[in-house]
Image (tube, rainbow, N blue to C red):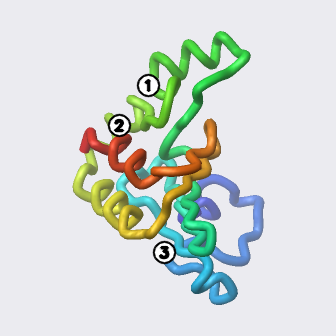
Amino acid sequence: MPHLASTKRRDLRFDAILSDEPPAASRGQIDQLVFRGFAPLNETVFFHRPSRTVLFTDLLFNVTHTDSAWTRVLLTLDGGFGGPAVARTFRLLMKMRERTVSASVARILKWDFDRMILAHGDVIEHGAKAVLQDAYSFL
């Protein structure tokens, strides 16, 4: 992640900082984009061309079940429980940089993906592009 070395983990040594360009060994297989406009995360989104799969970590949730009542309550209050969604707290911050966030989403939507893997929740096996458009329709 950009800025990780200088702001969060000065004790770690980094060989490379992710950017919009994949490493030479991955080109043609993986595309990547540093999601701009939401500085708290500086998340990099990945697209695996052969499987038509996009990978998100914190920019989108698809939590539909949990054994923890506490997690269920918190995610429900923040709009991140019950199906694909951008958390309300994230929406608020993203609206402040709407043009930049919209440009990042538009670049992702140019990729030819159908499947989405998320760090938080269930995999979306089909129709992921429409899911992403719907989740970011608040912009």
What amino acid is found at the position of numbered circle 1 in the picture? Gly
Instruction: Check disc 3 and report the residue beneath it.
Output: 20
Q: Quadrant of the C terminus?
A: top left
Q: Earlier in the sequence, mark 2 or mark 1?
A: 1
Q: Earlier in the sequence, mark 1 or mark 3?
A: 3
Query: In the image, 23: left or right of 14?
Result: left
Instruction: Check disc 1 and report the residue beneath it.
Output: 79
Single out the mark in the foreground, 1 or 3. Answer: 1
Residue at 39 percent of width and 29 percent of height:
88
Instruction: Check disc 2 and report the residue beneath it.
Output: 91
Residue 127 percent location from the top left of the image = 46, 50
Q: Secondary structure at mark 3?
A: loop
Classify 10 Å Cα crowding around label 2: few (below 14), some (14-19), many (20 and above): some
Residue at 63 percent of width and 53 percent of height:
8
Residue at 59 percent of width and 16 percent of height:
72
Query: In the image, 39: left or right of 134?
Result: right
Between marks 2 and 3, how big is the CA–CA gap?
Answer: 23 Å
Between marks 1 and 3, how big is the CA–CA gap?
Answer: 29 Å
Between marks 2 and 1, how big is the CA–CA gap?
Answer: 10 Å
What amino acid is found at the position of numbered circle 3 in the picture? Asp
